Image: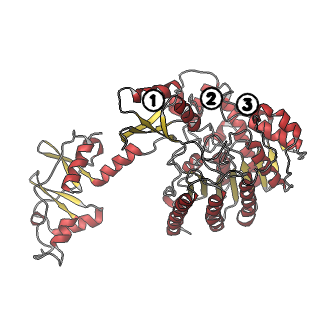
Amino acid sequence: MLVREMMRSPVTTLPPEASLREAGELFQARGFRHLPVLDGGRLVGVLTDRDLRWATSALCPEPLSLDAPVEVAMSRPPITIDPLDPVEDAARIMRKHKIGCLPVMDGPDLVGILTGMDILDTLIKLTGISLPSSRLEVALADRPGELARLTAFLAGRNVNIHSILTYPDPDRAVRTVLRLGSSQIRPLAEDLAREGFRVLWPVPKPWPR
Amino acid sequence: MATLIHRPEYAQYDFGPEHPFTPARLEMLLDLLRELEVPLDLLAAPAATREDLLGVHDPAYVAAVEALSRGEEGAGAESFGLGTPDNPVFPGMDLAARWLVGGALHGAHLLLEGREAHVLQLGGGLHHAQRDRAAGFCLYNDLAIAIRAMVDRGWRVAYLDLDLHHGDGVQSLFYENDRVLTISLHESGHYLFPGTGHIHELGGGYARGLSINVPFEPFTGPEDYLEAFEAVVPRVLETFAPHALVLQAGADAHFDDPMGDLALTTQAFERLYRRAMELADQHAHGRLLATLGGGYEAKVVARVWAILVLTLLGRPIPERLPPRWLARWQPLLGPEPPGCLHDPVPPYPPIPGAESRHRHNQDTLARLLDSLGRYWL
């Protein structure tokens, strides 16, 4: 998934000379936490609600007045991203710098903004339920063709796969979580186990049948 | 007393010999009731019309079901959830499903006209069907269409879903409707089909707080289930004070069911049915419309639903299963048929992990009650 699919636009921005009061009113009224600052179309910084609160806090050694311009309180230089970068890069950059948003720059132009909330929306989209489906969890051996063997089995049963997530397992297997468009998951899991797959969910019932 | 609705055409709702949602489940039930000498005065209801369906379903979806039902190819079956292992296409499926819808709808009309207070539709309970999609063996949402009929006449309706699976279709069709309260108790969607039914699905708009979900961990038994039922259902019904209660009485939360992982017993089902009747009497003007639902183990479903019928009819529940019934259904009952209507006590050895499961279920319940407190309770 690319940044341009997840970003928001158009972006609300401020000029460098806008006052902190003006910025605070925008934060409150619109529920923003980040405002890119543009100087004649050029991105010069990002004012975050943390910048604002610190700059005007009694804890700050030299607190600013609410009439001060945003350019003296904003974070800079801004850390930005390209609309064609993948969303996992955006997540890595935000995590590394411990920041909450990335202005999205296409050349010199600000074309959108990506926030931590958009990254969470992506996570929900990647892991969530889009259609009625069952969970199947299988530990696959870490070698070529294992996922193909699993999907071929499901194709043979005419079972549609709505999503697949894989991640490394501590014991070197590939933990594979599927959402399948079938409610008949227990009988399917029993057949998979007979085919030699290590099925982690559903597990056999803990009482005799 | 209660009116029982059924007609032989319900057997046409048949996805084929390999499919779990087989009409044999109904035949076994009716045969068991006859062998138990329960007087069966079955009311035959007319099929629902296309117009009835359009109260909750998308015209394009209904048109696709009709076309596939006539054997027309290329109606885009898959985009409507049809032609899958769960919902195979079969000739005549449109009418077969409309017979079932008609039964539930007729039950709603009996309540609306004041001719009957307790109605049980012996079939149906197709709670997964969505506005524009078949799902989980359900083509048309009979429950939602019956609820729609009552809401259209100005009633407020409470829906109680005891099926193993989340009642997602009914929930989503009334998600923002403040005249319908939906309550579903089910195995957690983290594990089981359809994957929804989490406690944070609370309804939208003016109906915020009117979708209530009580998910249980896999292998949850009767104690946790009944505890949560009592903590949630009586108080929300009392506060909502509906004109009628609609009950989806799926039997697949039984421990022997092959589809899921809950561990209810026949005794627990009897208790739930009695409570549903009492709660309808106390908080819903005594009006109860019940349907069947999921339930896929031949050794279980007829017994559980016979208990439902006997409870609604106010008749005692006999101990032994009739030998002739056992003999007739031996091929389906297998080498170890049940001997009694009720499960043995104890039904199974203690299930490992009971303590952590109990704690998890209790935490979930506490979070749910906390959210409901914020909206209306």
Amino acid bearing label 3: Gln
Q: Can you identify the residue that label 3 sits on? A: B12
Is the residue under label 1 in contact with that under label 3 (CB below 8 Å)? Answer: no
Q: CA distance from mark 3 to mark 1?
A: 35 Å
Q: Chain of mark 2?
A: B
Q: Chain of mark 3?
A: B
Q: Secondary structure at mark 3?
A: helix
Q: Can you identify the residue that label 2 sits on? A: B66
Is the residue at mark 3 from the same chain as the one at mark 1?
Answer: no
Q: Nearer the viewer, residue B365 or A169?
A: A169
* Sequence-first disc among 3 and 2: 3
Q: Position of residue A63 (x, y in %)?
A: 12, 75
Q: Can you identify the residue that label 1 sits on? A: A150
Q: Position of residue A33 (x, y in %)?
A: 25, 61
Q: CA distance from mark 1 to mark 2?
A: 35 Å
Query: For the point 29% across and 65% down, which residue is it?
Result: A29
Q: CA distance from mark 3 to mark 2?
A: 15 Å
Query: For the point 80% across and 54% down, which residue is it?
Result: B312
Q: Nearer the viewer, residue B128 or B25?
A: B25
Residue B12 visible: yes
Query: For the point 49% across and 26% down, which residue is it?
Result: A153
Say few, some or many: other residues with alpha carbon within 10 Å of mark 3 (under 14 / 14 to 19 / 20 or more). Answer: some
Q: Secondary structure at mark 1?
A: helix
Q: Single out the residue that lies furthest toward the bottom.
A: A58
Task: Please give left or right for residue B250 compared with residue B35 in the image.
Answer: left
Q: Quadrant of the C terminus of chain B?
A: bottom right
Amino acid bearing label 1: Leu
Amino acid bearing label 2: Glu
